[in-house]
Amino acid sequence: MFPPVDTKDANAIAAFVGSAFTRMYPGESRAWLDRLFRDVQGFFTGGHPDYGPVDLQYHDLEHTLQATTCICLLLEGRHDSGVIPPLSARQFELAIAATLLHDTGYLKLRSDRVGTGAKYTFYHVLRSCAFAASYLPTLGADEIEIDIVLGAISCTGPAREINLVQFRDPIGRVIGNALATADYLGQMAAADYPDRLEGLFSEFQESDDFLHLPPQRRIFKSASDLLQRTPAFWEKFVFPKLELECQAMYRFLARPYPQGSNPYLEAVDRNLAEIKRRLCVPAIGGS
């Protein structure tokens, strides 16, 4: 089964991550992770007193859970490989926190009745950092821990150059690399990724409208334009970024490590093949 857990089920993901945590760090309490999952699920479903439920078609709770599953598997593979420096139990918790909070910047205040959170696409990383900085102290996180989470969140988003992010120590960079990798692979390896691209375009369109961008400055002109450019996006931008800026962290997803197959890369290849197949199918009524 790929992935090995249902990414539509937040409780299943919480149990999956908790089980991996217990195996990697026997004797450590899962209470912090359990609270984190419970809270974040509530944030996305309308349980926060100040924010409404997420209302996006693409960057929804499942997207966050896809990334969380991927980073858990990646860090589990890294842990089992014995690579130096290892992540402590607390650092693993912070990596999961960064992943669960990395798209909270799409949440809208309850007083905001205009459009969806997609309008914040261009600024959502900054908004996610602000949300995390106000939430994490309620879990007892200190200044250094919050800085690690904010640094990792800052590694997400296509425009961000990870090499320019300031990290306190090498582990901060490891967590940032892992989150950026999981953010891309979690979504692009999903079985329904080709079907969800129209929803992604709608988010870009709403953001462009919100920013009053003229047509000539918009990255994608239509949903079909986004679909057409997706294979090149992976081949010329995403994979080189994962390989170089993210220091090939994806290799820890191989099972067994290091020579085994990589189910995430294989799933991306399948999705790209499906997208290319659809692009070759002539439109109804076409010549």
Image: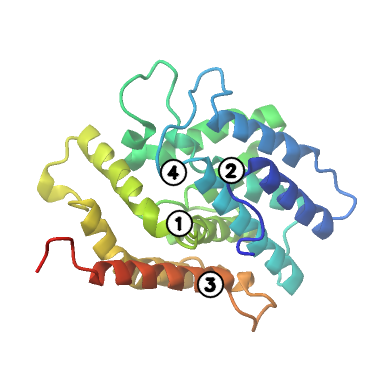
Amino acid type, callout 1: Asp
Residue 11, image x, y percentages:
69, 41
Residue 21, image x, y percentages:
77, 53
Inter-mark Cα distance, 1 to 4? 14 Å
Q: Which numbered disc, 4 or 3, marks the residue closer to the eye?
A: 4
- Going from N to C along the chain, the mark reached first, 4 or 2, is 4
Q: Which numbered disc, 1 or 4, marks the residue closer to the eye?
A: 1
Foreground pick, 24 / 204:
204
- Going from N to C along the chain, the mark reached first, 1 or 4, is 4
| Residue on which disc 2 sits | 100
Inter-mark Cα distance, 4 to 2? 12 Å
| Residue on which disc 4 sits | 59
- Going from N to C along the chain, the mark reached first, 2 or 3, is 2
Does residue 133 sit above or below 180 in this rendering? above
Looking at the rendering, in which quadrant would you find the C terminus? bottom left
Inter-mark Cα distance, 2 to 3? 22 Å
- Local crowd at mark 2 within 10 Å, few (<14), some, or many (≥20)? many
| Residue on which disc 1 sits | 192
| Labels 4 & 3 near each other (Cβ < 8 A) | no
Residue at horizontal 38 percent and vertical 59 percent from the top: 194
Q: Which numbered disc, 3 or 1, marks the residue closer to the eye?
A: 1
Residue at horizontal 70 percent and vertical 78 percent from the top: 256
- Local crowd at mark 1 within 10 Å, few (<14), some, or many (≥20)? few
| Labels 4 & 2 near each other (Cβ < 8 A) | no
Inter-mark Cα distance, 4 to 3? 25 Å
Q: Which numbered disc, 2 or 3, marks the residue closer to the eye?
A: 2
